[in-house]
Image (cartoon, rainbow, N blue to C red):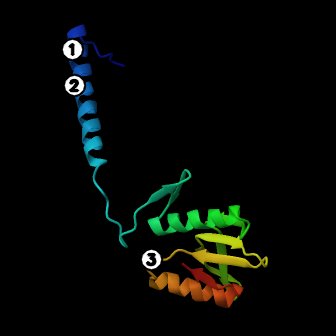
Amino acid sequence: MKSLRMTEDQLEAIKGRIGKVRTHRIAELEEMSHLEVKTKYGNVKTEVDGIWFASKKEAERYRQLRLMELANEIADLKRQVSFKLHVNGMEVCRYICDFQYRDKSGARVVEDAKGFRNAVYRLKRRLMKACLGIEILET
C-alpha cells in the first residue's frame, strides 16, 4: 500500500481550497434559504407552539381548537389521527385527519381544515362514511 506524501505547503494549500469551497457552498445555501418555494395549492407551512402545520388555515384552526379545549368546550384534542379504510376485508388506504376531538356531548369529531378538495380527498371522505360511518367536518 502506497502512502501519500506532501509538504506542509501543499497540505495548507489543499486545506485552503477545501475551506473556500465550504464557505462558498454555505453562502450559496444562505442565499437560497431566502427563496420561497411555491406549493401545488399555494399553502404556506406555519408554526404554532413549536408544531408545524401544512397551511396557515390549519394552524389558525389549531389555535381556535386549543382555545376551545382550554375553555372546556371540547376535549381530547389530537392531531394527524390515522384511519385504516377496509373494503371487503382488504385495506384500501388510510385517511389522516387534521384534528380529532370530543365535543360537549362526548361525540367524536373528525375534522379537516381544507382549502382545496382534490379527487383523492373526496374519495377518502366517502370511504370514511361508507366504511367507518364517520362524517368529516370541513373547516
Q: Where residue 85 appears, x then y in whole percent?
A: 65, 80
Residue flagged by tag 1: what amino acid is it? Gln
Q: Residue under circle 3?
A: 115
Task: Measure the C-alpha gap from mark 1 to mark 2.
Answer: 11 Å
Residue found at x 71% / y 70%: 74
Residue 19 in the image: above or below residue 24:
above
The mark nearer the N terminus, 1 or 2, is 1
Is label 1 in a helix, a strand or a loop? helix
Residue flagged by tag 3: what amino acid is it? Gly
Neighbor class of circle 1 (other Cα within 10 Å; few <14, some 14-19, many 20+) is: few
* 16 vs 43, nearest the viewer: 43
* 128 vs 41, nearest the viewer: 41
Residue 17 is tagged as 2
Residue 1 in the figure: left or right of residue 94: left
Residue found at x 27% / y 53%: 35
Q: Quadrant of residue 11?
A: top left
Residue 112 in the image: above or below residue 47:
below
Can I make out residue 55 in this image? no
- How many badges with numbers are in the image? 3
Foreground tag (2 vs 3): 3
Residue found at x 28% / y 32%: 22
Q: Residue under circle 1?
A: 10
Q: Where residue 33 appears, x then y in whole percent?
A: 31, 47
* 81 vs 11, nearest the viewer: 81
Foreground tag (1 vs 2): 2
Q: Quadrant of residue 17?
A: top left
Task: Measure the C-alpha gap from mark 2 to mark 3.
Answer: 49 Å
Q: Where residue 115 appears, x then y in whole percent?
A: 45, 77
Task: Measure the C-alpha gap from mark 3 to mark 1.
Answer: 60 Å
Foreground tag (3 vs 1): 3
